[in-house]
Amino acid sequence: MAPSPTGPIHIGNMHTALFNWLFARKAGGKFILRFEDTDRERSDAKYEQLIYDEMRWLGLDWDEGADVGGPYGPYRQSERLPLYAEYARRLTDSGHVYPCFCTPEELDAERAAAQKAGQAYKYSGRCRGLDEAGRRKLESLGRPPSLRFAVPAGQVVVIDDLVRGRIDYPADAISDFIIVRPNGMPLYNFAVVVDDITMRISHVIRGEGHISNTPVQILIYQALGEPLPQFGHVGHILLPSREKMAKRAGNAYVGLYRDEGFMPEVIVNFMALLGWTPPDGREFLTLPEIVAEFSLDRVTKAPSVFDPDKLSWMNANYIRRLERDELARRCLPFLVRAGLVAGGLEQGPGAAGAGSAPPGMVPSDFGRVAWIVGLEQERIETLAQIVPATDFFFRREVTPDEPAAKALQAPDVGNTLEQATATFGEVADWTPEPLEAVGRALAERLGLSPKLVFQPMRAAITGRLASPPLFDTMAALGRGLSLERLARAVAFAKAPA
C-alpha cells in the first residue's frame, strides 16, 4: 500500500489496501505500507498519521513501514532520492534513458499540433537523436535536462494479470516518457519500480486505473534486468449512479463513515465483498474468516458498486448482534461528544470486560446508559444515531416536536394526562410490567383505547411520537422525571392555543 499523504484516505485506496492485506495474510507474506510523498507542497505528516489511524481502526496492520521500520527502508519516497539517482545512472549508463532539453512551451506546441491534426499525442523524440555536441550546445544555453526513457520499437509488452488474464500492450503506443524531472525529482512510474525492486515486492494488487502504467513499469524492470512482480488489477469502485467514486467527493473518505457511526468490522466486511465473493456466498464474515476464504481467483475485474444503503443495512445487522454492554461502550463516545453523558470517551470494541463499566464511569451510570442504549438496539442503523434517538433520556426538559405538540393539544388530552399524572404518582414499583398494568387499567377506567392514553403520555415524556416501548422508556427515565414531564405536559395541553 503506497498512498500519497496529501489528504484523508480514500475508500478506493483503503479497498486496495484491504485486498493486499488479505492476500499477504492468507499467503503468510509481508504487507508493506510506504508513502509516495514527493509532492512536497501537498504532503503533510498529519495525513500520514491519519492513514495510520484509519487503517488501525479497521484492524489492518503492516509488517514494514515508516513508523515501524523494516529491512528495506526508508519507507518515504522523499527519503529515497539518492537511491533513485543511482538507478537513473544505471539506466543512463546502459543507454535506456537520454537527456531531454525540451521546454514546457515546446512540448505544449507538440501537443497542440497533434490535437489539431486529430491525433493522439506522442513525444516526437527529437532529443533522442541528439549527439554529444548537440547536447553540450543545449546545456550551454542553461537548459536543465529531464531524463526520458527510450521506448523500444516494435515490442509487445505482456501483462500476465492475476485478475484479468493476459494483456498485450504494443510498445509503439507508448511515448518516450520522463523518469526524472530537471530538478532531480523522480516521477511516479520510475520511483515505484525502484521501490518495488529494492523492497523485494512480489505482488502488486491495485485498481484498474493503473493498467496503463503497468507496461511503462515493465519496460523499466526489463531495462534494469530485474524480475517482474506479479500484477493484479481490480475493478473500480462506483457509486449507485454508476459514476466512479471521486477522490475529492465528500462521501469518499473512510473517516466520514467512522464519524457517522459505522463499525470498523462492518466496513471491512462490506469492502471485502466489493469485487470478491466467498465460496459459500455468505455476506457476514469476520476478518479471520475473510482471510481464510480470500483468493484472487474469486476477485472480479468488473466494477463494484459502493451502496450506502447496503452498508447501513449491514451495520444495522451487526448492531443487532452485539451484546448490550458492548453496544453501549461503542455508543458512549457519541453520547459524550453530544454532551449527554460525562466521561468514557476513549472507548472501543472490548475496551472493558463484559458487564463492566468503562474507565472513568461509575458502574451504575454505565448500567443506565446500557439500559437506555439497549432500548434502541433494534431501531438504530449507525452508532451516531443513538444521540437523536436517546437524547430525551439525558435532558431535564424536552420540547415536543411538531407531531407531539399536535397530539398534546388534541381535545381532552389535558384531562387524560392529568388523570395519568395522578394515577402513576401512586405507583411504587417503577418497572415496565407494573407500569403497563397501571396504564391499561387507567385506559379501561377512562373508557378510552390504550392508544388514546399511551400516545399523549409518550408525547409528554419523550417529546415525540416514536420511541422505544412507553413503559420501558418510563422505567429507564425514572419515576421523578417521568412524573415531572407528565405534569408539565398537562399545563401545555391545557394552555390556550
Image (tube, rainbow, N blue to C red):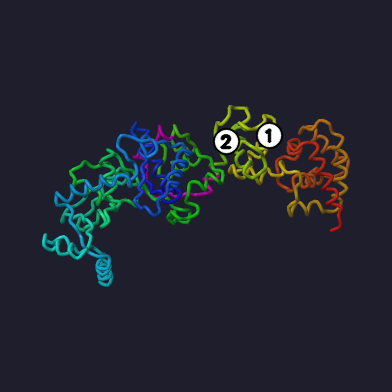
- Quadrant in the picture for residue 312: top right
User: Is residue 110 depicted above or below 96 in this figure?
Assistant: below
Mark 1 → mark 2, Cα distance in angstroms: 17 Å
Q: From the image, which quarter does the N terminus lie in?
A: top left
Q: Secondary structure at mark 2?
A: loop
Q: Is residue 436 magenta?
A: no
Pointer 2 residue: 347
**Percent x, y for residue 286?**
48, 34
Q: Can you name the residue that lies furthest to the bottom here?
A: 116
Neighbourhood count class around disc 2 (C-alpha, 10 Å): few under 14, some 14–19, many 20 upward: some
Pointer 1 residue: 371
Which mark is drawn over residue 77? none
**Percent x, y for residue 3?**
38, 47
Q: Is residue 293 magenta?
A: yes
Q: Amino acid at mark 1?
A: Trp
Q: Give, as a single range, the part of the protein colored magenta.
A: 290-312
The reply to whether dot 1 and dot 2 touch (C-beta < 8 Å) is no
Given residues 254 and 358, the one toward you in this image is 358
**Percent x, y for residue 446?**
88, 43
What's the residue at 88%, 40% (across, down)?
422
Given residues 233 and 481, the one toward you in this image is 481
